[in-house]
Image (cartoon, rainbow, N blue to C red):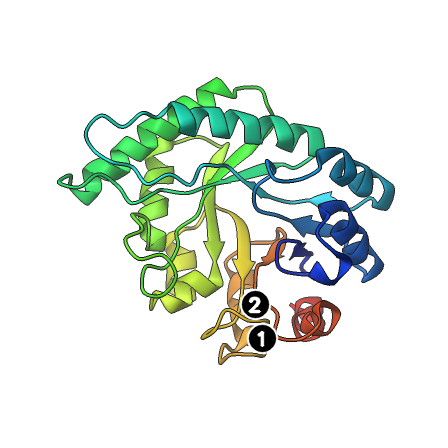
Amino acid sequence: MYQLSANIELLFTEAGEDAGDRVRAAAAAGFDAVEMWFSTDKDLDSLEKALADTGVQLTSLLAGPRMTYTYPGTDLAPFHEGLDLAVAHARRLGCPRVVLASGMGFPGMSREKNHQFLADMFSEALARNDGSGVEFVLEPVNSRVDHPGALTDRTEDAVDVARAVGSDRFGILYDLYHSIVQGEDPATELANAAGFVRYVQLADAPGRGEPGSGTVDWAAQLAVLRASGYDGPIGLEYFPTVPSEESVQRIRALAADA
């Protein structure tokens, strides 16, 4: 059975704007894990208390800014400062991982050189946060629908960067929605990414709604995921088309048998 982690940016918005209230709503609906995007726009006191009161685990948060790199002369200070702050917040909230983005890369540089630049930048970030206990995961995102121009728009791109970083504190976030929309075969990508997948998210396609709103065979895809050896949490990062509690029913039933 997979642990499902509700994305409180998109789910349980019925509870209001406060992240802590959304955590409590997720807990009341039976969730023992949640994920979120940025920590800098949250009331951390409220969020920290809600997590402590409910025993819910925060499984991931994002580092900002999700910068678009411009070559030459890019100032990477905002990246490092944003990531350092995300790590500090992750430690405070008991979150084991921070999600990174690639940006759009440097015009005029080959994909290989862009990947090496990212690897060097992320390696420096790891060194800056040595001993934090927080791992980093690089997220490849589709460029066909949601993120035109994204540098790591294929799973293999993120794997290339993770391999170059070469740290057990660095891996990839594999999002089934992004992979499928990009035209990838999850079984193939997960096999090629063996050893690097540290976190998983999903949404249905097309539309990025809850499982059952699109055409993905989720029983089959969860079986593929299980066969790949992944047994960690799965983030539910989708835009619900029905009330939050109703939207999770199908994936809950499937995850219970996966």
Which image quadrant for residue 122? top left
Q: Residue at x 42, y 61 (%)?
A: 178
Disc 1 residue type (three-letter):
Ala
Which image quadrant for residue 95? top right
Q: Is residue 151 visible?
A: yes
**Circle 1 is placed at which residue position?**
219
Q: Quadrant of the C terminus?
A: bottom right
| For residue 97, side relative to residue 69 (left or right) | right
Q: Which mark is residue 222?
A: 2
Q: Residue at x 37, y 63 (%)?
A: 188
In this rendering, is residue 178 above or below 254? above
| For residue 85, side relative to residue 78 (left or right) | right
Q: Is residue 12 visible?
A: no
Q: Residue at x 33, y 68 (%)?
A: 183
Q: Which mark is residue 133?
A: none
Residue 19's spot in the image, x, y percent? Answer: 71, 47
